Amino acid sequence: MAAETPKIEFTPTTIVLVFLAGILLTLIEIEAMEYSWDKLGIPHRWFFGLLIGSLFGSALNLPLARLGGKSEDHTLLAINLGGALLPAALAIYLLINRPETTVPAVIGAAVVTGLSFLVAQPMKGVGVAMPLFVAPLAAAAAGMVLAPDSPAVVAYVAGTLGTLIGADLLNLGRMRTIGAPIVSIGGAGTFDGVFLSGLLAVLLS
């Protein structure tokens, strides 16, 4: 006799526990993000604006161009608001306000760019994907080695810009071959690698 497939029953108690666990994880994540931005020296009045903008902005892809001309199987090239524009703007803001970190940040971004390019994989029908922890670990190490007095800024800049350049921009030439209807810089495949990379890099540093 064939074994029966186990069934999961969602009782009211189970639903409440799952809901409470979700709230707890959200609070922990927000606390970690707030601590990250504290280390970066970002004013608290900006915190929730940046958080909400990045999270909700991840659903907004701004069209840039068509790859493949006007054919029906063309790929739309876009840039993601939450995964590319906002993190890049914050990285530039940090560099402008912390000019002493420019050289180590550029070196760190170059290292992360190289690693991201090596591990990023264009996936047919999806876009560019990469392992989550490669960029933040490399960026955190760069921050601690290259700028021990201000590792958080270097880690964030290296983690965000390095991922965007190495995983997305340097792979634009291969985008036409993966068969995705839309390819977004900082989008689904690399959003975690950009948004979370910067924050994890700051925490690790």
Image (cartoon, rainbow, N blue to C red):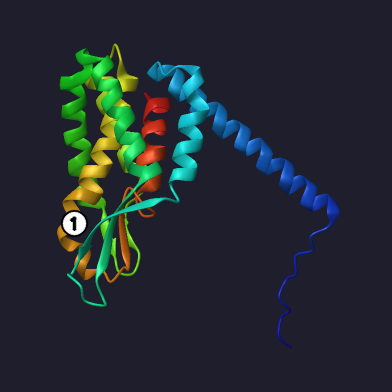
Residue 123 is drawn in which quadrant? bottom left
**Which residue bears the numbered disc 1?**
172
Seen at 26% across and 15% down, the residue is: 98
- Image coords of residue 119 (percent x, y): 25, 51
Residue 84 is drawn in which quadrant? top left
Few, some or many C-alpha atoms within 10 Å of disc 1 (few <14, some 14-19, many ≥20)? some
Q: Can residue 138 be seen in this view?
A: no
| Residue 67 against residue 153 in the figure, above or below | below
In depth, the one of 45 and 7 nearer the eye is 45
Q: Can residue 10 be seen in this view?
A: yes
- Image coords of residue 18 (percent x, y): 72, 48
Seen at 30% across and 21% down, the residue is: 94
Q: What residue type is labelled 1?
A: Leu
Residue 70 is drawn in which quadrant? bottom left
- Image coords of residue 139 (percent x, y): 29, 32
Seen at 25% across and 36% down, the residue is: 161
| Residue 13 against residue 48 in the figure, above or below | below
Q: Is mark 1 on a helix, strand or loop?
A: helix
Seen at 36% across and 30% down, the residue is: 201
The C terminus - image quarter: top left
The N terminus - image quarter: bottom right
Q: In the figure, is residue 160 to the left or right of 165?
A: right
Instruction: Name the residue furthest bottom.
Output: 1
Q: In the figure, is residue 49 to the left or right of 189?
A: right
